[in-house]
Image (cartoon, helix red, strand yellow):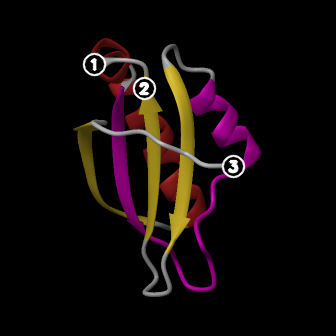
């Protein structure tokens, strides 16, 4: 599994949380396993998308860039960084 982590600085009075439409666009991409969106009290936020494999991650790059750019403009967010990772451990408890 692979992950793309994007770091943002939301505008004033905003967390920059994605809309349901944005979430659905991401989840509809081939190989997408899920999305997390995190907000910090220091006014930064992260989106973490999870992908089946490296091919899915690479194949999503252009569409993800388009969604990230559109969403950032709509929500007045600054994109600080975009990084890609291989997920080495995955454990969730209910």
Q: Earlier in the sequence, mark 1 or mark 3?
A: 1
How many residues crowd around disc 2 within 10 Å: few (fewer than 14), some, or many (20 or more)?
A: many
Whether residues under marks 2 and 3 lie with C-beta atoms below 8 angstroms apart, the answer is no
Residue 81 sits in quarter: bottom left
Alpha carbon of mark 2 to alpha carbon of mark 3: how far? 21 Å
Above or below residue 18? Residue 4 is: above
Q: Looking at the rendering, in which quadrant would you find the N terminus?
A: top left
**Residue picked out by circle 2:** 51
Alpha carbon of mark 1 to alpha carbon of mark 3: how far? 28 Å
**Residue 55 or residue 87, whichever sits in front:** 87
Residue 85 sits in quarter: top left
Q: Earlier in the sequence, mark 2 or mark 3?
A: 2
* Residue at far right of view: 20
**Residue picked out by circle 3:** 94
Whether residues under marks 1 and 2 lie with C-beta atoms below 8 angstroms apart, the answer is yes
How many residues crowd around disc 3 within 10 Å: few (fewer than 14), some, or many (20 or more)?
A: few
| Residue 72 coordinates in the image, percent (x, y) | 49, 56
Judge from the rendering whether residue 80 lies leftward or rightward of residue 92; answer left or right: left
**Residue picked out by circle 1:** 54
The residue positioned 42% from the left and 75% from the top of the image is 44
Secondary structure of the residue carrying tag 2 is: strand
Q: Is residue 5 magenta?
A: yes
Secondary structure of the residue carrying tag 1 is: helix
Q: Tell me the mark number nearer the camera, choosing from 1 and 3.
A: 3
Above or below residue 36? Residue 86 is: above
Q: Is residue 57 magenta?
A: no
Which residues are the magenta region? Answer: 1-27
The residue positioned 75% from the left and 44% from the top of the image is 20
Secondary structure of the residue carrying tag 3 is: loop
| Residue 42 coordinates in the image, percent (x, y) | 43, 87
The residue positioned 62% from the left and 77% from the top of the image is 14
């Amino acid at each position: 599994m692979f992950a793309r982590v994007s770091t943002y600085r939301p505008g004033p009075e905003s967390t920059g949380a994605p809309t349901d439409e944005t979430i659905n666009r991401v989840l509809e991409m081939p190989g997408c396993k899920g999305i997390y969106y995190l907000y910090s009290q220091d006014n930064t936020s992260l989106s973490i998308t999870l992908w089946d494999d490296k091919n899915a991650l690479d194949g999503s790059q252009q569409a993800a860039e388009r969604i990230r750019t559109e969403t950032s403009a709509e929500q007045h967010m600054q994109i600080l960084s975009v990084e890609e990772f291989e997920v080495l451990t995955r454990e969730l408890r209910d």
